[in-house]
Image: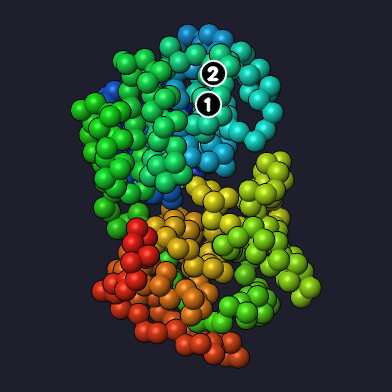
Amino acid sequence: MPFSKLGLSAPILKAIEEQGYTKPTAIQAKAIPIICNGKDIIAAAETGTGKTASFVLPILQHLQDAPEVRAKRIRALILTPTRELAIQVEANVQLYAKHLNLNSLAMYGGVDDEPQKAALIAGVDILVATPGRLLDMYTQRAIHFDEVEILVLDEADRMLDMGFIADINKIVERLPEERQNLLFSATISQQVRFLAKTILEDASEITIKSKKDKPKINQWLIPVDKDQKSALLSQLMQENEWPQALIFIETKRGAAKLVSQLEKRGIKAEAFHSGRSQAIREQLLADFKAGKLQYLISTAVAARGLDIDNMDLVLNYDLPDQADDYVHRIGRTGRAGASGEAISFVSRDDFRSLCYIEKRIGIMIPRKNVKGFEPRAEIPKSDLNWKPKSPQAKGRR
Ligand code: AMP
């Protein structure tokens, strides 16, 4: 089905065409007509499926002919878990709205709030915000919610994981009762379902099962001792000459240390973590997206929700504790039909995490030893039916 059959107006279709999209992705084909009909939805869709456009386009369609918005009022509110995602979603709004007379704003913490207040006074139709800063602005009476018509919860599972439930409830309680609600989540857990029950009304449920949209990701792991990881990484970087790689590491300190270890071997990389200023993070992200920066070494929290295009390679320098985080990380690659590669360094200490991950993804990740880096401490054979022995492992996924 082409975009033109989805009932979107000519200026929106023009913007889509300019993006080079030829046809809607599965989530777009399913969600857009339902949202345009004014219904609430709950959708299971990960980043990389085109989910952002699936809610932004109907919002634009709905708001395009509305009279100018009053100062400090907004018409559509999109809540996101992180500032990076807020920036990215708002950038998409701008792209798709470029032939419309609608204003948008990304609002998040960690930066001066004065420019955000000024923008609200000048008029914002579509606000993309993180919950904490939004509540702060509401308390300061810099924003009123009485004209909100559409609420979007993007990456609802992440927001719950990050402990935003109380903030979300406070915000929702203050919105007009009569409104449309759209909830997007990579996974529909029991908690997400509970949240949906309190917020949505008579919602249509959309799950994307189509394999066609599933990115092909070539995953493999390299068994390696912990103290050999940085030497292994620099050898692989020198041998493979990867155009770009997004590298995940556990701690901020680890990220900074790795950057300096690589530097000593003549490899330039940048650390991306919450200890760096917002301005630097934005600059790094822009440089990375523009291809000016080859290696970005990021902690998991900093990288949540990032939309980095044309990512060929994701490398887990450290395996995440949570299996869902692994799925999210490798979701940075192989987007929109392209294939990608996900390499993980796994040491003996990571065995437990590896078992959780393999159980979650339902496959055993192929192992490849690299000559000269075979681990002294062998990693046991994994088993998809593995069960933790110790009680402290409870609660991990
Ligand atoms: P998202 O899942 O919203 O993070 O989108 C993932 C990527 O897919 C983004 O880079 C979008 O620009 C791109 N995208 C969204 N819709 C389409 C489409 N219909 N055709 C091709 N690419 C798309």
Q: Position of residue 208 (x, y in %)?
A: 28, 48
The residue drawn where x is 40% and y is 79% is 366
377 vs 180: above or below = below
Residue on which disc 1 sits: 134
> Label 2 sits on what residue type?
Thr
SS under mark 1? helix
**In which quadrant of the rendered view does residue 311 lie?**
bottom right
Three-letter code, disc 1 = Leu
Give the label on residue 89, or none. Answer: none
Residue pictured at 48% horizontal, 63% vertical: 320
Mark 2 residue crowding within 10 angstroms, few (<14) / some (14–19) / many (20+):
few
**Lower sequence index among marks 1 and 2:** 1
Q: Is residue 208 above or below residue 152?
A: below
Q: Where residue 172 appears, x then y in whole percent?
A: 38, 24
Q: Is residue 371 left or right of residue 271?
A: left
Of 24 and 155, the residue lying toward us: 155
Q: Which mark is residue 139?
A: 2
